[in-house]
Image: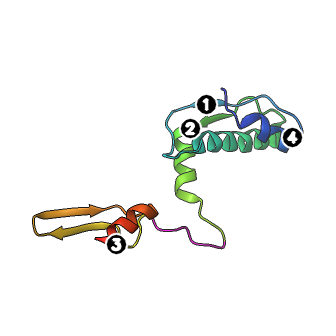
Amino acid sequence: MSNAFWSDLSAAVFGETVPSYSVQGSGHLPSFYKVSDFVEASVGLAGVALARFCNGDGDQVLVDRRLASLWFDMTLRPDGWDASGLWDAIAGDYQCRDGWIRLHTNAPHHRDAALLV
């Protein structure tokens, strides 16, 4: 297992880099950032901490990367604020004289161009 987040997270919690966890499964959340790597290391860290607490040995922790990513994606929500919508208020499908057009106006320059028409 090679996860760039593991050494920093385990050192922050345990005061040292501790032996790692095992990984099964694959995949990642769609993001520019390494969110799935962070999720995998975070779930692994929680598992190692819990195993150490229960039996003093965190060497047998197994993280299912796919399930950890799904849990992270479906359960975590902002605290104290609302996440912005997936689409801009103007974005959508519009009927035209010769068919349909889909406006993607999430980027400010796309929105500005659409509003000029």
Q: Which residues are magenta?
A: 80-85
Magenta stretch, overall SS:
loop
Question: Label 1: which residue?
Answer: 23
Q: Residue at x 35, y 65 (%)?
A: 113
| 82 in magenta | yes
Provide the secondary structure element on which disc 3 rests.
helix
The mark that comes first in sequence, 1 or 4, is 4
* Pick the front one: 15 or 23: 15
- Marking on residue 14: 4
Check residue 65 in the rendering and tell me which mark sits there, or answer none. 2
Query: Who comes first in sequence, dot 1 or dot 3?
Result: 1
Residue 50 forms part of the magenta stretch: no
Quick check: 87 left or right of 18? left
Residue 22 sits above or below residue 116 on the image: above
> Is the N terminus in the top left, top right, bottom left or bottom right quadrant?
top right
Residue furthest to the front in view is 116
The location of residue 6, given as percent across then percent down, is 73, 35
In the rendered structure, are the residues bearing label 1 and label 2 in contact, judged by CB atoms less than 8 Å apart?
Answer: yes
Q: Are marks 1 and 3 in contact (CB under 8 Å)?
A: no
* Residue located at (89% from left, 39% from top): 15
Q: Amino acid at mark 4?
A: Phe
Cβ–Cβ below 8 Å for labels 4 and 2? no
Which label's residue is closer to the chain start, 1 or 2?
1
Residue positioned most to the right:
15
Residue 43 screen position, x and y as percent: 67, 43
Q: CA distance from mark 1 to mark 2?
A: 7 Å
